[in-house]
Each structure stands twice: as C-alpha cells, then as structure tokens.
Amino acid sequence: MLTSVATRFAEARLFVPDVFTDERGYFKETYSRRKYEACGLRDVFVQDNVSRSHRNVLRGMHYDLRLAKLVQCIEGTIFDVIADAREGSPTYLQWESFELSEENHRQLYVPAGFAHGFLTLSDEALVSYKQTEHYDPAHERGLAWDDPALGIVWPLDGTPIVSGKDRTWPHL
C-alpha cells in the first residue's frame, strides 16, 4: 500500500511506499503507475535522473513551468525544499521543507511551477527523480537559494557548496 500525505500546498504530495524488510535488507517499489494513480497522481513521467552529492552540497532552486517531479533520496539524507514560483498563485513564494532519506523512504511530488532544491545532510546522498517533461535548458528557471524574499531557513553547517549556475539565479 502506498500512503499519500498532504503538504501545505494542495498540488504537492508526500508519498511513502510500502517497504518490506527482512534479514537480507529491504524491498520497495519506487514507482508503480497503478498505485500512484490510485492516490491521485496521474502524471506521465518521461525522464529519470540521479544525482550524487557530498555533505553540504546545496542544489537549487530550479523550476520549469511545464515540468513536475517525483523526488526520493535512495542513499543518505537531504533537506528538501519546494517553493511556489507560479506568479499569481495564492501561495506564491511560500515554501515548505521535508527530510528525505534512505531510512524514511519518503518521496516528494513537486508540481510544475514549483522551485525545488536540496541540501545534503549526510556524508553522501544519492537522489533519484522522475520528470514529466524532458529537460530543456530553454525552459529552466531558478530562484536564488538564499533570497531573503523567500526566507528559506536552511540547516547549514558552514558555507554550502553551490554550483556556478545556482549562484547566478536572481533575487526577487
């Protein structure tokens, strides 16, 4: 059974799949179209991505108005953040954070138009996500991870490791 948990945003969801554990380790389905559709997620995913990050790497805040994601942390732990980047939305620029880890098995559905980013809390983190559209740099947008207008409270341990591109996203 797949559990669906509400977030502060009507469009975003947190999913917790069944995990079957025994002396060998565990087994879980990371995605079953039938089960996610039964929980209301009808998106068709067309691309899968994986990133590996070291402690204190901060990725984001990226978004694409056409593209939704289903994000999970396969190894390690991340502080995962979404922010509504849809101008005119009643929740515009509001954000919410989630801890995703290999232990809690949570998956975050990031709706189209929501900025997404994460901070690696463990020594290493392996993050996997599905997308509803193919990546196209012409559609990629971003918000500055440290923009005071967003006011995201990151649990930083010193200066984060941020890519050159992520350092250039504009402040509002």
Image: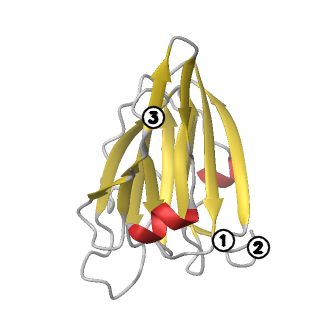
Indicate which label's residue lies in the foreground, 2 or 3: 3
Sequence-wise, the earlier of marks 3 and 1 is 3
Q: Nearer the viewer, residue 143 or 82?
A: 82
Against 168, residue 64 (above or below) is: below
The residue positioned 36% from the left and 39% from the top of the image is: 154
Point out residue 7 in the picture as x, y percentages from the top left corner: 26, 60
Image quarter of residue 27: top right
Report helix, strand or loop for mark 1.
loop
Q: Which of 170 and 107 is in front in this view?
A: 107
Report helix, strand or loop for mark 2.
loop
Q: Pointer 1: what residue?
A: 140
In the image: residue 108, left or right of residue 7: right
| Amino acid type indicated by mark 2 | Asp
The residue positioned 73% from the left and 63% from the top of the image is: 47
| Amino acid type indicated by mark 1 | Glu
Residue at the far bottom in the pictured view: 88
Q: Contact, CB < 8 Å: mark 3 with mark 1?
A: no
Q: Pointer 2: what residue?
A: 136
Against 116, residue 76 (above or below) is: above
Find the distance from the CA under tag 3 to the CA under tag 1. Answer: 34 Å
| Amino acid type indicated by mark 3 | Val
Q: Contact, CB < 8 Å: mark 1 with mark 2?
A: yes
Point out residue 40 in the picture as x, y percentages from the top left corner: 39, 73
Residue at the far top in the pictured view: 23
Marking on residue 131:
none
Q: Pointer 3: what residue?
A: 19
